[in-house]
Image (cartoon, helix red, strand yellow):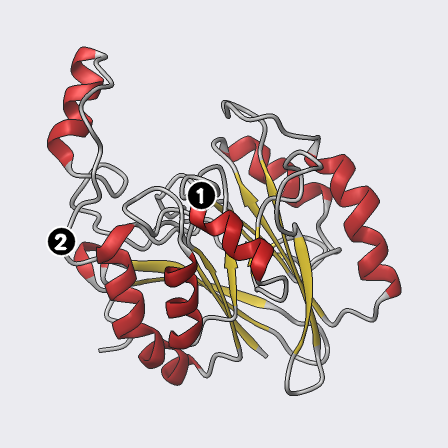
């Protein structure tokens, strides 16, 4: 099977790039299953039920979130009213948080796919449970007891060391472990010693002629002055779709390919 992982979709520019290019990407690379982080898809902060449904209609299978998960109150109501949704929020959010931190999907080809997400704790102003403890207590038993064929762990975190530490600790347990959140793709896509595909951060799907997806002027003013009243807004130029493709086979010989398509980082992968 082939799996497409797409990094943080930022604003309208990111959504348009996804809408216009996803069918081409899936066709060219023969993608079977698509996971998209969309916690920045609504104006740069959060997601709405409408945007979620649009992305599913474009061919996305799973939406993951992150620290901006609840910026739009609409999504909490949507999740509560649509319990069969394919939205995954960090597993280590507080216990009374809406939604689900993992889900098992039954693919049309008979394969069972586990998708889960944790949030890093370093430099994050959120009340979070320890991600290792939650993976140990809730996820490893699923992998062992539920005949899971393929498994994906997204680590939404600020620091590279935390993403690397989680990946190395669970190498061999998951098909792929990959990072999101910092909006910059790292160049370390590889297969770890025990067979798990890993990339520290798969980047963002947004306009890279920006400051991590936001218009440059106000972002720079905030840095120069320390005045946070300058409002950040998503950049509106052509977006680059950034992510990774995971290829697997029946012998569990997995591979990972980092991709950047369109915009200023385009690598001519679908031209």
Spatial separation of the CA atoms under disc 2 and disc 1: 27 Å
The part of the image, by quadrant, that contains residue 211 is top left
Q: Which secondary structure, mark 1?
A: helix
Q: Which secondary structure, mark 2?
A: loop
Left or right of 23? Residue 67 is right
Q: Nearer the viewer, mark 2 or mark 1?
A: 1
Measuring 72% from the left and 41% from the top, which residue is drawn there?
169
Image quadrant where one finds the C terminus: bottom left
Proximity of marks 2 and 1: CB atoms separated by less than 8 Å: no
- How busy is the neighbourhood of tag 1: few (under 14 within 10 Å), some, or many (20 plus)? few
Measuring 69% from the left and 36% from the top, which residue is drawn there?
131
Measuring 35% from the left and 80% from the top, which residue is drawn there?
23
Find residue 41 and name its label. Answer: none
Between 190 and 215, the residue placed more toward the observer is: 215
Measuring 36% from the left and 47% from the top, which residue is drawn there?
40
Q: Name the residue under label 2.
A: 237
Between 180 and 12, the residue placed more toward the observer is: 12
Image quadrant where one finds the N terminus: bottom right
The part of the image, by quadrant, that contains residue 71 is top left
Image coordinates for residue 173, horizontal then vertical, percent: 75, 55
Image coordinates for residue 191, horizontal then vertical, percent: 59, 58
Q: Mark 1 points at which residue?
A: 73
Please report whichever mark, 2 or 1, sits nearer to the chain's N-terminal start: 1
């Amino acid at each position: 099977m082939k799996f497409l992982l797409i990094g943080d979709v930022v604003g309208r520019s990111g959504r348009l790039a996804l809408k216009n290019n996803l069918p081409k990407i899936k066709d060219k690379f023969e993608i079977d299953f698509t996971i998209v982080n969309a916690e920045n898809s609504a104006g740069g902060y959060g997601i709405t039920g409408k945007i979620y449904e649009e992305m599913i209609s474009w061919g996305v299978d799973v939406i993951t979130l992150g620290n901006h998960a609840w910026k739009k109150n609409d999504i909490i109501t949507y999740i509560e009213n649509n319990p069969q949704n394919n939205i995954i929020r960090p597993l280590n959010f507080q216990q009374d948080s809406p939604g689900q931190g993992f889900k098992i999907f039954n693919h049309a080809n008979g394969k069972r796919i586990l998708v889960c997400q944790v949030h890093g704790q370093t430099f994050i102003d959120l009340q979070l449970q320890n991600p290792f403890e939650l993976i140990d207590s809730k996820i490893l038993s699923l992998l062992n007891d539920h005949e899971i064929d393929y498994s994906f762990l997204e680590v939404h975190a600020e620091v590279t060391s935390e993403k690397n530490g989680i990946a190395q600790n669970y190498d061999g347990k998951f098909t792929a472990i990959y990072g999101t959140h910092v909006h910059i793709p790292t160049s370390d896509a590889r297969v770890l010693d025990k067979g798990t595909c890993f990339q520290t951060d798969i980047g963002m799907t947004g306009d890279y002629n920006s400051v991590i997806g936001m218009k440059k002027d106000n972002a720079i003013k905030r840095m120069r002055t320390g005045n946070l009243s300058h409002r950040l807004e998503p950049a509106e130029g052509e977006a680059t779709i950034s992510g990774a493709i995971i290829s697997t086979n029946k012998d569990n010989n997995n591979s990972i390919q980092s991709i950047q398509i369109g915009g200023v980082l385009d690598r001519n992968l679908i031209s």
